[in-house]
Image: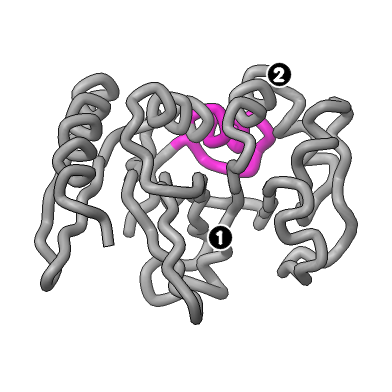
Amino acid sequence: MLNKNFREHEKEVWTRLSEEIGGQFNHEKKGEGRYDTVKAKVGPWTITLDLHADASYAHEDIHTRLRAPYINPDGFRFNLFKASMWDELTTVFGGQDVKVGDAAFDEHFRVRASDENKVKDLFARERLRELLLQESGAHLYVRDSGVWWQDEFPEGVDEIVLELGGAIADLGRLERMYSIFAEALRGLCRIGSAYEKEPEI
């Protein structure tokens, strides 16, 4: 449970972020708690910033999350995460880790994908790699709506997600998250794995 002082600070910082990126801060009460979001645009896509809780037996892990649905014309999916974080985890992609060709990046992150050439092309942009290395715990991936969200999204629409550990109320880090997300979405368009239009959902 996040304390009141953090929530007030979060509201102030998230509101400032929303003003900077032309978005909208939203506050909603949910039972005893609250659910805050920032809705904004990256190109034609609507993105959502929120806090996401993963409950385990012993405790609850909070993540700061950016996500956006998009049209995925070729079914390309990838999963980038910190090295050693889930190295032994069996993923939906199967297959081996992909090396993108940047020694520092390949040492720090694991990348798995449904298409090796496409994921190398996606991370060929130095700007995206540099931003991700500044957020060492970043988890950036495409969530298959056909597996997870078939009631929410129509066929051919998936969701790209960026998660960072903890509840983040630091404007600089939130701006960096937004920049990473924008670079990734535009990169998916560049490699032909997203359409530059908002899905109808």
Give the residue at mark 1.
143
Residue at 21% across / 50% down in the picture?
36
Tag 1: residue type?
Answer: Arg
Q: How is the image coloured?
A: one colour
Would you say 112 lies left or right of 140 here?
right
Q: Quadrant of the N terminus?
A: bottom left
- Disc tally is 2
Q: Nearer the viewer, residue 97 or 47?
A: 97
**Magenta residues, start to end:** 182-196
Q: CA distance from mark 2 to mark 1?
A: 24 Å
Where residue 14 sits: x, y (%)? 24, 34
Q: Position of residue 38 (x, y in %)?
A: 25, 41
Which residue is disc 2 drawn over?
126
Residue at image location 63% in from the left, 36% down from the top: 136
Please tell me whether residue 165 is drawn above or below residue 201 in the rendered image. above
Asked if 62 appears above or below 47 in the picture, the reply is below
Image coordinates of residue 91 in percent, x first then y, are 74, 67
Q: Quadrant of residue 200?
A: bottom left
Res 197 quadrant in image:
top left
Does residue 194 show up magenta in the picture? yes
> Which secondary structure, mark 2?
helix
